Image (cartoon, rainbow, N blue to C red):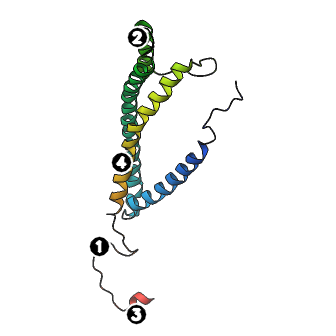
Amino acid sequence: MAGEQRPGTTQVPAPLVVAGVGIGCTFASMITVAMRNVSPALAGAASGVFNTNRQVGTVIGTAGVGALLQNRLLAGFTAQTQLYGAHLPAAVRARLLAGFQAAAKGGFVTGTGNRGNRLTELVFTHGFIEAMRPTIIVPILFLLAAAVCCLFVKRRSAGDDGVAHEVTEPTAATAG
């Protein structure tokens, strides 16, 4: 039914809010670190290179995680179909397995009126969870590697450009 609320739907907004705040805080400091030593004359070009690299990295990362998830879905659905469908006749089990394998390769049709029986719900739920566990590890490892890299970012004072400057007393010509 349209008004039916599935278990867990109230648990989704809180992590999304936390992720949004975290991403907002991350991008601001990341841009600051990337642009802090760039001269104003090159700021536009440097910003363009930075954003291009960030977007390409996001696309490659998302594609990699998506490919891994698709691979793990195929394996998870196959394993769960064999586990939960062991009591079915071989022909029915083979058809169920072929349906889940096709869905893992080409996508699912969901929505109102497409509810499966208890067996297909079990296979889908457990297969999806089995696929997500190793898939979620990849972005977590990249986040941990990025956090370790942040430890090596050197802090510089506002006037530190790496060049030794001699401090002198102002003269009449420079004082005004």
Q: Could you tell which of marks 2 and 3 lies nearer the N-terminus?
A: 2
For the residue marked with disc 2, what is the amino acid? Ala
For the residue marked with disc 1, what is the amino acid? Gly
Q: Are marks 1 and 4 in contact (CB under 8 Å)?
A: no
Q: Nearer the viewer, mark 3 or mark 1?
A: 1
Q: Is residue 4 above or below residue 153?
A: above
Q: Nearer the viewer, mark 1 or mark 4?
A: 4
Counting other residues with Cα less than 10 Å from the Cα at mark 3, is it few (<14), some (14-19), or many (20 or more)?
few
Q: Could you tell which of marks 1 and 4 lies nearer the N-terminus?
A: 4
Q: Could you tell which of marks 2 and 1 lies nearer the N-terminus?
A: 2
Gap in angstroms between the C-alphas marked 2 and 1: 68 Å
Q: Nearer the viewer, residue 24 or 132?
A: 132
* Visible residue check, residue 109: no
Q: Could you tell which of marks 3 and 1 lies nearer the N-terminus?
A: 1
Gap in angstroms between the C-alphas marked 3 and 1: 28 Å
Which residue, given by chain and number where applicable, does mark 2 sit on? 94
Single out the residue that lies furthest toward the top: 91
Choose top left, top right, bottom left or bottom right for residue 33: bottom left
Gap in angstroms between the C-alphas marked 2 and 3: 93 Å
Gap in angstroms between the C-alphas marked 1 and 4: 31 Å
Q: Is residue 149 above or below residue 73?
A: below
Which residue, given by chain and number where applicable, does mark 3 sit on? 172
